[in-house]
Image (cartoon, rainbow, N blue to C red):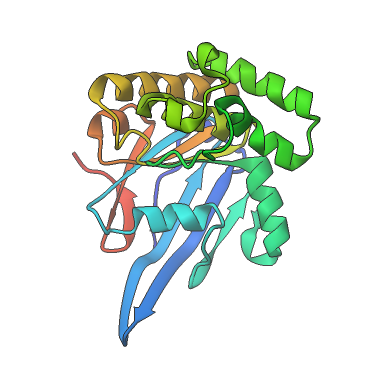
């Protein structure tokens, strides 16, 4: 049975930025059937910060992939700004991700042949923005995350913290409605992770972007508006 997570008081009557309805995902391999998600319901609103915690292998990354349209649910539905992902073509889902969803991964996934500025500008360039405009916007964001002196450096010339800062700037350059972050500080030392925390929280406040953050780091999770736990395929509020 689905476990509905509570609606935040600040949401009032607005529609959620992203909604999951009775979301299930079953994997079958070598005759084995594993139900990773079982009827997940989730509403996340503009400007809200939600942490999802749970044991390794509990399905947290699977849930993010479904929310971002990178995977297809076995049952249930994901709606982004009221649009049902199941009713969109692959091309339409790609456009929707580019315009409304930003992704931050544990591993930065920056393109090695491009500079930090070019990597950050990439979502706008894919969208068809004029190159000069996209590069100016990338420069501004990189300056805001303390990387003005690293614009022309390629990923291999950047530290781990710098690469993650660039990845976060890339995720928000298009001012998406939602950012999906999968262990964004998982490979960083505590000092660098703290800097990333503050940057994410500041961008959330300034842009009103909703953040859904999968993390094992309870220090980061406690800075979110809600903490949800995924256990036995069911998403529910964390009881501490």
Query: Is 11 displayed left or right of 232 in the figure?
Result: right
Task: State the image quarter where residue 135 is shown.
Answer: top right
Q: Position of residue 104 (x, y in %)?
A: 47, 39
Quarter the N terminus occupies = bottom left
The residue located at (65%, 30%) in the rendering is: 121
Residue 81 can be seen, yes or no: no
Query: Where 124 falls versus 159 (above or below)?
Result: below
Q: Position of residue 240 (x, y in %)?
A: 18, 39
Query: Where 157 falls versus 213 (above or below)?
Result: above
The residue located at (48%, 42%) in the rendering is: 109
Q: Position of residue 57 (x, y in %)?
A: 27, 59
Q: Position of residue 71 (x, y in %)?
A: 51, 63
Residue nearer the viewer, 49 or 61: 61
The residue located at (47%, 55%) in the rendering is: 65
Residue nearer the viewer, 82 or 53: 53
The residue located at (62%, 36%) in the rendering is: 176
Label total for image: 0
Query: Is 12 displayed left or right of 232 in the figure?
Result: right
Query: Where 73 falls versus 80 (above or below)?
Result: below
Residue 190 can be seen, yes or no: yes
């Amino acid at each position: 049975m689905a476990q509905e997570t509570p609606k935040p008081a600040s949401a009032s009557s607005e529609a959620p930025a992203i909604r999951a309805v009775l979301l299930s995902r079953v994997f079958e391999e070598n005759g084995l059937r594993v139900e990773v998600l079982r009827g997940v319901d989730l509403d996340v609103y503009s400007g809200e910060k939600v942490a999802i915690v749970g044991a390794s292998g509990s399905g947290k990354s699977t849930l993010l992939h479904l929310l971002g349209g990178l995977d297809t649910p076995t049952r249930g539905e994901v709606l982004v700004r009221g649009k049902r992902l199941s009713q969109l073509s692959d091309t339409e889902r790609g456009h929707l991700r580019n315009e409304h969803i930003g992704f931050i991964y544990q591993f930065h996934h920056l393109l090695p042949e491009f500079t930090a500025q070019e990597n950050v500008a990439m979502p706008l360039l894919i969208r068809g923005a004029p190159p000069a405009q996209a590069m100016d916007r990338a420069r501004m964001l990189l300056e805001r995350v303390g990387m003005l002196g690293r614009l022309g450096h390629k990923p291999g010339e950047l530290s781990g913290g710098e690469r993650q800062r660039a990845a976060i700037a890339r995720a928000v350059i298009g001012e998406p409605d939602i950012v999906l972050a999968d262990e964004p500080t998982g490979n960083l030392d505590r000092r660098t992770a703290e800097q990333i925390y503050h940057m994410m929280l500041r961008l959330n406040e300034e842009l009103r972007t909703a953040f859904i953050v999968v993390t094992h780091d309870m220090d980061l999770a406690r800075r979110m508006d809600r903490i949800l736990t995924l256990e036995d395929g069911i998403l529910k509020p964390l009881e501490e």
